[in-house]
Image (cartoon, rainbow, N blue to C red):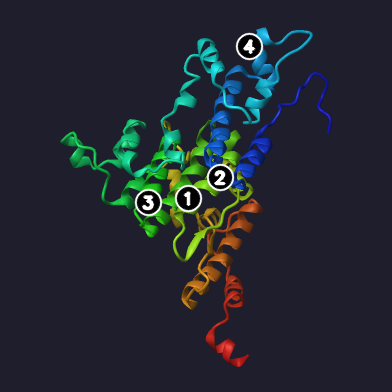
């Protein structure tokens, strides 16, 4: 459908950036993870500039920030490469910083080191967390030790992750990634898996409560291919796709707006997501939402005992039901009775098997 006269279309670059991340994910190049992370880094920088300037496309951003390179006869296409995440800015960072104070902070954000799987996290975990937001440090470090000016991670990792989920933001995502990677490097598969679940929810919440909304697909793609594989156990791994996460993020965003219109906000000021996280963990907001938003799992072991295979088969039925409810934009807090038949079909009982 053509736009009305005088109305210009906003150019979207997310699909191009996702494709680039996926190409690096499929590459055996030793620097592939760093290159894929670079796409996300540049995307966040560029989209922040565009939002601040109110620009429709890369050409407009470049012309406002570097008018000297745009003439009637020729102009550089470097800003198109920045928009697509195909080129990492270097010299131009300082020039843009002179015009837009604080713009460089996005590229210099210390959390990028937490997301860079090229370097081990173990020896620098505490130091990295100390560079993050004070509220995130409080969530991660043992309260009694902090009073003695000592920085020790909480021994109760579940409590640590819960506190991060209540403060969803970019720094919380970085901290949860550190916890996940640390558990993975220490051989704690279950710990890494639990951290992966929190990280999944943090990514969704951060996407709907921050400027990450428009670069969410490429963020999801990076984490799915480079971070979440570290959260696999010997039995199961996270079965995620960036398109599916993007769809769930949109459903969550609609839900947030709906509650705001009703005067019951789910996310508070300053990355307060205590109420929003309950959508994922509490039946108060309905089993349809709990199950529809839940991360999918898959078996990775060649041999899995019957009880684990049955559990996953049942979960698939519940997940699919929750997803259907969300997709149709309706509410159904409790699973319907006919779901029992689907559960039986997913994994017949012993009696049914014997009769066959």
Percent coordinates x, y for residue 112 in the rendering: 45, 34
Near mark 4 (Cα within 10 A), the count class, few <14, some 14-19 or many ≥20, is some
Mark closer to the chain start, 1 or 3? 3
- With 297 as the anchor, is 183 left or right in this view? left
- SS for dot 3: helix
Mark 4 vs mark 1: in front: 4
Mark closer to the chain start, 1 or 2? 2
Hey, which quadrant is residue 346 in on the image?
A: bottom right
Q: Nearer the viewer, residue 216 or 90?
A: 90
Is mark 1 in CB contact (under 8 Å) with mark 2? yes
Q: Distance from label 1 to label 3 (Cα)? A: 31 Å
Q: Nearer the viewer, residue 104 or 118?
A: 118
Residue beneath label 2, please?
A: 252
Q: Distance from label 3 to label 4 (Cα)? A: 44 Å
Residue beneath label 1, please?
A: 279
Mark closer to the chain start, 2 or 4? 4
Is mark 3 in CB contact (under 8 Å) with mark 4? no
Q: Residue at x 67, y 13 (%)?
A: 63
Percent coordinates x, y for residue 306 in the rendering: 49, 78
Mark closer to the chain start, 3 or 4? 4
- SS for dot 4: loop
Q: Distance from label 4 to label 1 (Cα)? A: 45 Å
The dot on residue 185 is: 3
Q: In the rendered image of this protein, does residue 113 appear above or below residue 88?
A: below
Q: Is residue 326 visible?
A: yes
Q: Is residue 259 visible?
A: no
Residue beneath label 4, please?
A: 66
């Amino acid at each position: 459908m053509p736009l009305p006269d005088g109305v210009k279309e906003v150019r979207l670059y997310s699909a191009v950036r996702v494709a680039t991340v996926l190409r690096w994910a499929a590459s055996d190049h030793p620097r592939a993870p760093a290159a894929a992370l670079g796409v996300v880094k540049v995307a966040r920088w560029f989209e922040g500039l565009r939002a601040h300037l109110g620009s429709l496309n890369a050409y407009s951003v470049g012309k406002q920030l570097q008018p000297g390179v745009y003439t009637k006869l020729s102009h550089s296409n470097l800003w198109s490469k920045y928009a697509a995440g195909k080129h990492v800015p270097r010299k131009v960072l300082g020039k843009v910083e002179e015009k837009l104070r604080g713009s460089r902070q996005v590229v210099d954000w210390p959390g990028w080191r937490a997301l860079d799987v090229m370097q081990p996290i173990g020896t620098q975990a505490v130091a990295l967390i100390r560079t993050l937001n004070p509220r995130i440090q409080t969530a991660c470090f043992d309260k009694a030790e902090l009073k003695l000016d000592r920085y020790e991670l909480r021994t109760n990792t579940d409590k640590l992750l819960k506190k991060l989920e209540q403060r969803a933001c970019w720094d919380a995502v970085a901290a949860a990634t550190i916890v996940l990677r640390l558990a993975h490097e220490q051989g704690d598969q279950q710990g890494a898996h639990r951290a992966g679940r929190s990280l999944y929810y943090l990514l969704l919440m951060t996407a709907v409560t921050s400027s990450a909304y428009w670069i969410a697909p490429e963020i999801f793609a990076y984490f799915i291919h480079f971070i979440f594989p570290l959260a696999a156990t010997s039995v199961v791994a996270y079965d995620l796709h960036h398109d599916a996460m993007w769809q769930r993020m949109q459903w969550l965003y609609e839900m947030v707006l709906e509650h705001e219109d009703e005067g019951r906000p789910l996310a508070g000021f300053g990355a307060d997501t205590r109420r929003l996280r309950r959508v994922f963990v509490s039946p108060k907001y309905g089993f349809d939402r709990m199950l529809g938003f839940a991360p999918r799992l898959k078996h990775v072991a060649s041999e899995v005992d019957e009880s684990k295979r049955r559990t996953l088969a049942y979960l698939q039925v519940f997940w699919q039901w929750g997803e259907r409810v969300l997709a149709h934009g309706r509410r159904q807090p409790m699973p319907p009775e006919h779901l029992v038949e689907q559960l039986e079909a997913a994994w017949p009982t012993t009696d049914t098997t014997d009769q066959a």
